[in-house]
Protein backbone atom coordinates (compact mmCIF):
# COMPACT_ATOMS: atom_id res chain seq x y z
CA UNK A 1 0.00 0.00 0.00
CA UNK A 2 2.86 2.39 0.77
CA UNK A 3 4.35 1.79 -2.68
CA UNK A 4 0.98 2.46 -4.30
CA UNK A 5 0.50 5.68 -2.35
CA UNK A 6 3.97 6.93 -3.24
CA UNK A 7 3.21 6.32 -6.90
CA UNK A 8 -0.11 8.12 -6.65
CA UNK A 9 1.57 11.05 -4.96
CA UNK A 10 3.63 11.71 -8.08
CA UNK A 11 1.81 14.01 -10.54
CA UNK A 12 3.30 12.16 -13.50
CA UNK A 13 1.89 8.84 -12.25
CA UNK A 14 -1.39 10.12 -10.87
CA UNK A 15 -3.40 8.70 -13.75
CA UNK A 16 -1.75 5.26 -13.92
CA UNK A 17 -4.86 3.37 -12.68
CA UNK A 18 -6.76 4.63 -15.72
CA UNK A 19 -3.95 3.48 -18.00
CA UNK A 20 -3.92 -0.02 -16.50
CA UNK A 21 -7.68 -0.47 -16.65
CA UNK A 22 -7.70 0.43 -20.37
CA UNK A 23 -5.23 -2.36 -21.23
CA UNK A 24 -7.66 -5.13 -20.26
CA UNK A 25 -10.49 -4.21 -22.66
CA UNK A 26 -8.02 -3.53 -25.48
CA UNK A 27 -6.42 -6.94 -25.01
CA UNK A 28 -9.84 -8.59 -24.84
CA UNK A 29 -10.90 -6.97 -28.10
CA UNK A 30 -7.68 -8.13 -29.73
CA UNK A 31 -8.37 -11.67 -28.58
CA UNK A 32 -11.82 -11.54 -30.20
CA UNK A 33 -10.37 -10.35 -33.52
CA UNK A 34 -7.57 -12.91 -33.41
CA UNK A 35 -10.08 -15.75 -33.31
CA UNK A 36 -11.67 -14.45 -36.54
CA UNK A 37 -8.50 -13.87 -38.59
CA UNK A 38 -8.64 -16.20 -41.64
CA UNK A 39 -5.00 -17.34 -41.44
CA UNK A 40 -5.78 -19.05 -38.12
CA UNK A 41 -8.36 -21.31 -39.78
CA UNK A 42 -5.68 -23.64 -41.16
CA UNK A 43 -4.44 -24.51 -37.66
CA UNK A 44 -6.24 -26.65 -35.12
CA UNK A 45 -9.19 -24.88 -33.62
CA UNK A 46 -8.45 -26.10 -30.10
CA UNK A 47 -5.05 -24.37 -30.15
CA UNK A 48 -6.60 -21.01 -30.96
CA UNK A 49 -9.36 -21.59 -28.41
CA UNK A 50 -6.69 -21.99 -25.74
CA UNK A 51 -4.90 -18.84 -26.90
CA UNK A 52 -8.23 -16.99 -27.02
CA UNK A 53 -9.07 -18.11 -23.47
CA UNK A 54 -5.56 -17.24 -22.23
CA UNK A 55 -5.68 -13.71 -23.63
CA UNK A 56 -9.15 -13.26 -22.20
CA UNK A 57 -7.92 -14.36 -18.77
CA UNK A 58 -5.00 -11.94 -18.96
CA UNK A 59 -7.42 -9.16 -19.95
CA UNK A 60 -9.66 -10.03 -17.01
CA UNK A 61 -6.73 -9.98 -14.58
CA UNK A 62 -5.61 -6.59 -15.90
CA UNK A 63 -9.15 -5.27 -15.52
CA UNK A 64 -9.30 -6.45 -11.90
CA UNK A 65 -5.85 -4.99 -11.21
CA UNK A 66 -7.02 -1.71 -12.71
CA UNK A 67 -10.09 -1.70 -10.46
CA UNK A 68 -7.92 -2.26 -7.39
CA UNK A 69 -5.69 0.62 -8.48
CA UNK A 70 -8.71 2.86 -8.98
CA UNK A 71 -10.02 2.16 -5.46
CA UNK A 72 -6.53 2.85 -4.04
CA UNK A 73 -6.52 6.09 -6.02
CA UNK A 74 -9.89 7.06 -4.57
CA UNK A 75 -8.75 6.36 -1.02
CA UNK A 76 -5.55 8.35 -1.50
CA UNK A 77 -7.32 11.40 -2.92
CA UNK A 78 -10.39 10.95 -0.66
CA UNK A 79 -12.77 10.46 -3.59
CA UNK A 80 -16.04 8.57 -2.88
CA UNK A 81 -16.43 5.10 -4.44
CA UNK A 82 -19.24 3.85 -6.64
CA UNK A 83 -21.24 7.09 -6.91
CA UNK A 84 -21.17 7.69 -10.70
CA UNK A 85 -22.68 5.90 -13.68
CA UNK A 86 -19.12 5.31 -14.87
CA UNK A 87 -18.38 3.30 -11.72
CA UNK A 88 -21.58 1.28 -11.95
CA UNK A 89 -21.14 0.45 -15.63
CA UNK A 90 -17.46 -0.39 -15.12
CA UNK A 91 -18.11 -2.80 -12.24
CA UNK A 92 -20.99 -4.48 -14.12
CA UNK A 93 -18.75 -4.87 -17.17
CA UNK A 94 -15.97 -6.62 -15.23
CA UNK A 95 -18.45 -8.89 -13.43
CA UNK A 96 -20.11 -9.80 -16.73
CA UNK A 97 -16.69 -10.41 -18.29
CA UNK A 98 -15.69 -12.78 -15.45
CA UNK A 99 -19.01 -14.63 -15.75
CA UNK A 100 -18.57 -14.98 -19.52
CA UNK A 101 -15.04 -16.33 -19.11
CA UNK A 102 -16.16 -18.95 -16.60
CA UNK A 103 -19.05 -20.00 -18.84
CA UNK A 104 -16.69 -20.23 -21.82
CA UNK A 105 -14.27 -22.37 -19.82
CA UNK A 106 -17.04 -24.71 -18.70
CA UNK A 107 -18.71 -24.92 -22.08
CA UNK A 108 -15.93 -24.90 -24.65
CA UNK A 109 -12.72 -26.10 -23.00
CA UNK A 110 -13.72 -28.78 -20.49
CA UNK A 111 -13.91 -32.18 -22.26
CA UNK A 112 -16.77 -33.27 -20.02
CA UNK A 113 -19.03 -30.45 -21.22
CA UNK A 114 -22.27 -31.84 -22.76
CA UNK A 115 -22.72 -31.18 -26.47
CA UNK A 116 -26.20 -29.74 -25.97
CA UNK A 117 -24.83 -27.29 -23.39
CA UNK A 118 -22.16 -26.13 -25.87
CA UNK A 119 -24.71 -25.71 -28.62
CA UNK A 120 -27.05 -23.65 -26.44
CA UNK A 121 -24.20 -21.64 -24.95
CA UNK A 122 -22.68 -20.42 -28.23
CA UNK A 123 -25.28 -17.70 -29.08
CA UNK A 124 -25.30 -16.57 -25.45
CA UNK A 125 -21.50 -16.41 -25.46
CA UNK A 126 -21.49 -14.33 -28.65
CA UNK A 127 -24.21 -11.98 -27.36
CA UNK A 128 -22.41 -11.47 -24.06
CA UNK A 129 -19.18 -10.70 -25.91
CA UNK A 130 -20.85 -7.97 -27.94
CA UNK A 131 -22.64 -6.57 -24.90
CA UNK A 132 -19.39 -6.45 -22.91
CA UNK A 133 -17.68 -4.66 -25.79
CA UNK A 134 -20.41 -2.00 -25.88
CA UNK A 135 -20.32 -1.57 -22.10
CA UNK A 136 -16.53 -1.35 -22.20
CA UNK A 137 -16.62 1.50 -24.70
CA UNK A 138 -19.25 3.35 -22.70
CA UNK A 139 -17.24 2.95 -19.51
CA UNK A 140 -13.94 3.99 -21.13
CA UNK A 141 -15.39 7.08 -22.78
CA UNK A 142 -17.16 8.19 -19.61
CA UNK A 143 -14.04 7.43 -17.57
CA UNK A 144 -11.83 9.55 -19.81
CA UNK A 145 -14.25 12.46 -19.51
CA UNK A 146 -14.54 12.07 -15.75
CA UNK A 147 -10.76 11.89 -15.32
CA UNK A 148 -10.32 15.08 -17.34
CA UNK A 149 -12.79 16.92 -15.12
CA UNK A 150 -10.94 15.73 -12.01
CA UNK A 151 -7.47 16.44 -13.35
CA UNK A 152 -7.97 19.68 -15.25
CA UNK A 153 -10.75 21.50 -13.42
CA UNK A 154 -9.86 20.08 -10.01
CA UNK A 155 -6.06 19.93 -9.83
CA UNK A 156 -4.14 21.67 -12.59
CA UNK A 157 -6.15 24.86 -12.77
CA UNK A 158 -6.55 24.62 -16.56
CA UNK A 159 -10.25 24.48 -17.44
CA UNK A 160 -11.38 21.55 -19.56
CA UNK A 161 -13.29 23.99 -21.77
CA UNK A 162 -10.03 25.65 -22.87
CA UNK A 163 -8.95 22.36 -24.54
CA UNK A 164 -5.37 22.08 -23.23
CA UNK A 165 -3.03 19.44 -24.63
CA UNK A 166 -4.24 16.81 -22.14
CA UNK A 167 -7.84 17.30 -23.23
CA UNK A 168 -7.00 17.10 -26.93
CA UNK A 169 -5.00 13.91 -26.39
CA UNK A 170 -7.72 12.28 -24.29
CA UNK A 171 -10.50 13.26 -26.68
CA UNK A 172 -8.47 11.84 -29.58
CA UNK A 173 -7.93 8.64 -27.58
CA UNK A 174 -11.69 8.37 -27.07
CA UNK A 175 -12.31 8.72 -30.80
CA UNK A 176 -9.68 6.04 -31.52
CA UNK A 177 -11.37 3.66 -29.08
CA UNK A 178 -14.73 4.21 -30.78
CA UNK A 179 -13.20 3.73 -34.25
CA UNK A 180 -11.41 0.55 -33.13
CA UNK A 181 -14.60 -0.96 -31.75
CA UNK A 182 -16.53 -0.07 -34.92
CA UNK A 183 -13.89 -1.93 -36.95
CA UNK A 184 -14.23 -4.93 -34.64
CA UNK A 185 -18.02 -4.94 -35.03
CA UNK A 186 -17.56 -4.76 -38.80
CA UNK A 187 -15.30 -7.82 -38.69
CA UNK A 188 -17.72 -9.74 -36.48
CA UNK A 189 -20.66 -8.95 -38.75
CA UNK A 190 -19.05 -10.26 -41.95
CA UNK A 191 -19.91 -13.87 -42.81
CA UNK A 192 -16.62 -14.41 -44.67
CA UNK A 193 -14.75 -13.64 -41.42
CA UNK A 194 -16.58 -16.39 -39.51
CA UNK A 195 -14.44 -19.46 -38.98
CA UNK A 196 -15.94 -22.33 -41.02
CA UNK A 197 -16.89 -25.53 -39.22
CA UNK A 198 -15.15 -28.69 -40.42
CA UNK A 199 -16.35 -32.25 -39.99
CA UNK A 200 -14.21 -32.83 -36.92
CA UNK A 201 -15.18 -29.44 -35.48
CA UNK A 202 -18.93 -29.64 -35.97
CA UNK A 203 -19.67 -28.86 -32.34
CA UNK A 204 -20.19 -25.11 -31.93
CA UNK A 205 -17.40 -23.59 -29.89
Image (cartoon, rainbow, N blue to C red):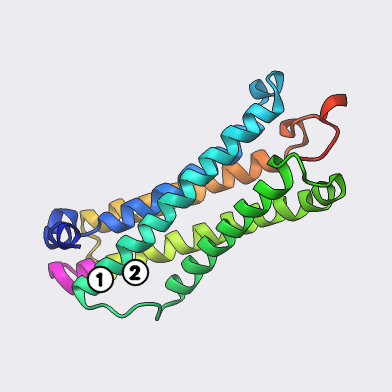
Q: Residue drawn at (75%, 55%), measured in percent from left and top?
A: 124
Q: Are marks 2 and 1 in contact (CB under 8 Å)?
A: yes
Assess whether residue 155 is covered by the magenta stretch: yes
C-alpha distance separating marks 2 and 1: 6 Å
Label 1 SS: helix
Q: Nearer the viewer, residue 19 or 57?
A: 57
Residue 180 visible in the shown view: no
User: Is disc 2 surrounded by few (<14), some (14 to 19) or many (20+) residues within 10 Å?
Assistant: few
Rendered location of residue 107, percent (x, y): 73, 48
Label 2 SS: helix
Rendered location of residue 180, percent (x, y): 51, 44
Residue 170 visible in the shown view: yes
Q: Residue drawn at (77%, 43%), measured in percent from left and top?
A: 112
Q: Seen from this angle, which residue lies furthest top?
A: 42
| Residue receiving disc 1 | 150
Q: Nearer the viewer, residue 179 or 99?
A: 99
Majority secondary structure in the magenta region = helix
Q: What span is in magenta?
A: 150-159
- Is residue 90 shown left or right of residue 169? right
The quarter of the picture where the C terminus appears is top right
- Is residue 38 shown left or right of residue 154? right
- Is residue 160 shown left or right of residue 203? left
| Residue receiving disc 2 | 146
Image vertical order of residue 147 relative to residue 62, above or below: below
Amino acid sequence: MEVTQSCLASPSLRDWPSVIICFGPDLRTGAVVLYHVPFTWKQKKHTWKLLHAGLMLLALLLSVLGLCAVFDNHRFFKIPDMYSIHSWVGICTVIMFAFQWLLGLAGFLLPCSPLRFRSNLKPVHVWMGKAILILTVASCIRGIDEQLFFTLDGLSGKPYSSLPVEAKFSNSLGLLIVAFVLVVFCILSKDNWQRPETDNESVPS
